[in-house]
């Protein structure tokens, strides 16, 4: 380091060196909150001066991966149906799209802290880091085939398809948050603003592909339930499966997800979450090159290497097993 580390930053250094990312973020937040003059546009440069390039990178990752305190990886029990996936009058619950789990209102379903929690001067670095992580995870998800259809073990297929919806929706929530930040004026230099616009463009493209995966999984759920309805010998089971099939089919074909946890404000404003949205022109070679020059994955990146020592819940895939089962309950954050 070219300058001595201030005493109030030394706990941050110690925590980062020990791999205690959550502690590092908490110490950093305390330092920014109690030191006059910190938190503005010059904060990022000052922090790198204090920590050095390597530890500064670790702090940015820690901020990007800090888990939301109000949910379990973006999910909460749906308040409208209390996790049962249907209402008292046997209709499918719209808020959770018949899955029993809804987005966390605090983090928008991303499972990570909102950018309001991040000091203004660090937000550009954090949004870029989180976007890289989410884009890598999205690529891995999109490379996985949906469960093949079949009559055997329908419950397991139903859960797997529900997981596919919720995983894609979590990343959509994270991309929506990133685009929302990029749209707001920031107290930072012009160069950072240009970088954020490139981030927003890449996030929009990835969101479009994730939205298609959501619709594909909903269509697969509709086919699964239709098959169950055709082959069930129990009239009540047959009726329930038929209702579920029609509901998922309608949702998959709907022009908008407004009113459900699949809706994301900033993506909707960009017509990303609309099946009837007009085709968008392909990115120009210049914009693609700009994305690469700033280290943003093109949607076909190598898997990101993440440190899971301190915050496994914030860096692993959501544990949505049994989301279509009325008995499913998300564990409290941090368990």
Image (cartoon, grey):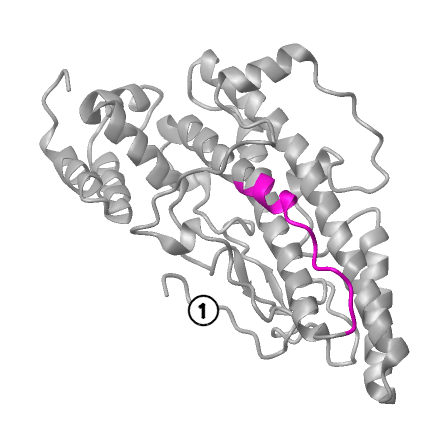
Query: Is 148 covered by the magenta stretch?
Result: yes
Which residue corresponds to the image point at 50% horizontal and 68% vertical from the top-left? 330
Which residue corresponds to the image point at 79% horizontal and 47% vertical from the top-left? 256
> Is residue 233 positioned above or below 266 on the image?
below
Which portion, as a residue range, is magenta? 137-151
- Relative placement, left or right, of 261 versus 135 is right
> Is residue 157 positioned above or below 116 on the image?
below
Q: In the figure, residue 8 lies in which quadrant?
A: top left
Q: Where in the figure is residue 121, as x and y percent of width and height?
A: 36, 26
Which residue is tagged 1?
331
Q: Where in the figure is residue 17, as x and y percent of width and height?
A: 18, 39
- Relative placement, left or right, of 33 versus 9 is right
Which residue corresponds to the image point at 61% horizontal and 32% vertical from the top-left? 299
- Relative placement, left or right, of 63 versus 280 is left
- Relative placement, left or right, of 334 versus 86 is left
Q: In which quarter of the image is the C terminus?
A: bottom left
Nearer-the-camera pick, 114 or 57: 57
């Amino acid at each position: 380091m070219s300058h001595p580390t201030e005493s109030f930053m030394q706990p941050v250094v110690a925590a980062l060196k020990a791999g205690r990312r959550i502690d590092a973020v908490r110490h950093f937040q305390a330092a920014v909150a109690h030191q006059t003059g910190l938190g503005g546009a010059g904060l990022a440069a000052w922090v790198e001066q204090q920590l050095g390039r390597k530890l500064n990178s670790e702090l940015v990752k820690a901020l990007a991966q800090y888990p939301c305190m109000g949910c379990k990886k973006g999910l909460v029990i749906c308040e409208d149906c209390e996790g049962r996936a249907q209402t008292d009058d046997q209709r499918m619950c719209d808020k959770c799209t018949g899955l029993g789990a809804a987005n966390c209102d605090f983090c928008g379903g991303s499972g990570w802290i909102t950018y309001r929690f991040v000091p203004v001067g660090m937000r550009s670095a954090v949004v870029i880091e989180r976007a890289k992580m989410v884009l890598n995870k999205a690529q891995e998800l999109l490379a996985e085939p949906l469960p093949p259809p079949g009559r055997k073990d329908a419950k397991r297929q139903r859960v797997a398809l529900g997981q596919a919806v919720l995983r894609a929706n979590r990343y959509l929530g994270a991309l929506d948050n990133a685009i929302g930040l990029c749209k707001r004026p920031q107290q930072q230099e012009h160069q950072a603003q240009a970088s954020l616009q490139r981030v927003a463009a890449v996030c929009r493209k990835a969101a479009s592909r994730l939205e298609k995966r959501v619709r594909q999984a909903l269509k697969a759920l509709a086919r699964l339930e239709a098959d169950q309805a055709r082959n069930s010998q129990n009239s009540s089971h047959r009726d329930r499966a038929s209702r579920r099939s029609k509901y998922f089919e309608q949702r998959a074909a709907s022009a908008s997800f407004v009113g459900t946890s699949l809706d994301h404000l900033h993506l909707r404003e960009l017509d990303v979450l609309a099946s009837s949205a007009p085709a968008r022109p392909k990115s120009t070679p210049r914009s693609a090159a700009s994305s690469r020059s700033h280290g943003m994955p093109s949607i076909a990146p190598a898997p990101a290497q993440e440190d899971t020592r301190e915050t496994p819940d914030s860096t692993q895939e959501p544990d949505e097993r049994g989301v279509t089962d009325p008995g499913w309950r998300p564990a409290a954050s941090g368990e």
